[in-house]
Image: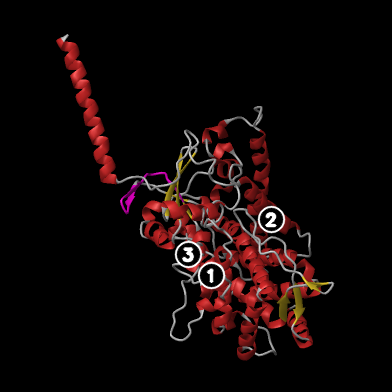
Amino acid sequence: MATLTGVVTLAFVLFVCIIVRLTSNRRRRGRIPPGPWGWPFIGNALDVPNAYAWKAFAKWSKNWGDIMMLNLLGQRVMILNSPSLAFELLDKKSAVYSGRPAFPVITEIMGWERETALRPYGPALKELRKLITQTIGNRTALLGLSTSLEHEALDFLCRVMSDPKTLRRQVDRYTTASILRITYGYNIKEDGDELVNVVKRAVETLSLASAPGAYLADVFPILTRIPAWFPGAGWKRQAQAWRVHHTMMYELPFKYSKQQLQAGTLEPCFVSKHLEDCDDPEREALIADAASSIFAGMWATTIGAILAFFLAMTCFPEKQKKVQDEIDNIIGNDRLPCVTDLDRLPNVKALCWEVLRWHAIFPLGKSTHPINVGAPHRLTEDDVHAGYFIPKGTTVFTNIWAMLRDHRLYSKPEEFNPDRFVPSDGSEPEYDPRQICFGFGRRICPGMQFAEMSLSLVVAMTLSVFNISKPVVNGKVVEPSLQFAANLISHPLPFECDIRPRSAKAAALLSSALDGRA
């Protein structure tokens, strides 16, 4: 009996010690950041809406604060709703916050593991980002490629002038053409270009595969071990079939560049800059990885920004007049603006900044579209911040949409107002939206310079020759829809606009400029 009592006493003492140890650790580390209560096992999986989740997160932050923790099927997911928190964690503690969640279907099965945004942080990723930054993340280097960018912009404007109703298709074509030319030195043929179809199919299948809930295997990676022939494994057969699209996107344009380089006919581009005099197979593979990452990472961003610009000008035509007056006064109307003019056009810059702020193309910081450089961050170690304990393995999302509408940073953030970025009467410009929309920390977009230059050039050239307004049908003004897709890549929904040359001289100038560059 005494022995039994001793065992019970010892067990009780051990139990108390364990409780004390756990309690002291919890106090030392702090508590988990707050968030909405979830259900057993599934956590908050049913609470997060399928559409416009960023709006729900912004609303929840009023109750739970700017740092919020969710439980999605056992995975801890932290939402950051303010840029100051994003900088504190993702920038200042980047050594801990630069990991990536696993996307086993996209990487292991579909073959995207070599892309920049999906690689774990380490020496290979640093070298990839360095390659990209040296060419399209560096303004001086981009100036050497400006002739190609200007030619594609001219071609875009001429196509829009010929058939304004095809605006969306022409934006798509311009974006594809400019990125392929800057990256591979490839000039696309007319509509139906096979190489264009190859790269677009790869990016489109990636978008489908990276949608939330597309594959249960992304939540439970062990499912990737199921044989493709197994009943119910149709998802794996589909993913394996899509692998060929990435393989073709990776190999075909790079093969074209190598052939043209060997023949001495490749125009200046990303590949020509880095591949010339390269005789190291590993280095060549790294260049190919970086090149395919550029297209996949920049395509959706550029399309969304240009479409948002045309929508804003349609809805707020008075805003374009100020920019047109600036272009007329500084550039004149005898030539079109070029890349070297952009630094002299502060109102063009302000308009571009407001487009980026007004419409968040990636409302969750590019965070749920894994190929993009702002894909979710993941903690590689435990962290304690502001008294909160944040466990290793936590996935971190930045609510870019909420940040760009933060009343602490922007006055009347719901309004489209480029003047907020133009200093006047001694007032300072409001917060630079580029510090938010291109991501944070060591995963910040390495192509942000290219994205901004491409948008600024299109804005300056478009407003120098076109007036954009609401269409009039049967004597009635058609009000465009200010609606944006609920997708993770949020482009403006289809809208109508009236695009006309500002004058006969402007139309002739555009046509002659393209003829002169042919």
Quadrant of the image for the N terminus? top left
Label 3 and label 1: CA atoms lie apart by 24 Å
Tell me the SS state at disc 2.
Answer: helix
Tag 1: amino acid? Gln
Please indicate whether residue 458 sits to the left or right of residue 343 in the image.
right
Q: Which mark is residue 406?
A: 3
> Does 106 appear above or below 502?
above
Residue labelled with disc 2 = 200
Give residue 308's position: percent from left, percent from top.
64, 67
Numbered disc in front, either 2 or 3: 3
Q: Which residues make up the magenta segment?
A: 383-396
Give residue 509's position: percent from left, percent from top.
75, 85
Residue labelled with disc 1 = 449
Residue 374 magenta: no
Give residue 478's position: percent from left, percent from top.
76, 69
Figure disc tally: 3
Q: Nearer the viewer, residue 78 or 100?
A: 78
Mark 3 or mark 1: whose residue is earlier in sequence:
3
Q: Residues within 10 Å of mark 2 (few under 14, many from 20)?
A: some
Mark 2 or mark 3: whose residue is earlier in sequence:
2
Tell me the SS state at disc 1.
Answer: helix
Quadrant of the image for the C terminus? bottom right
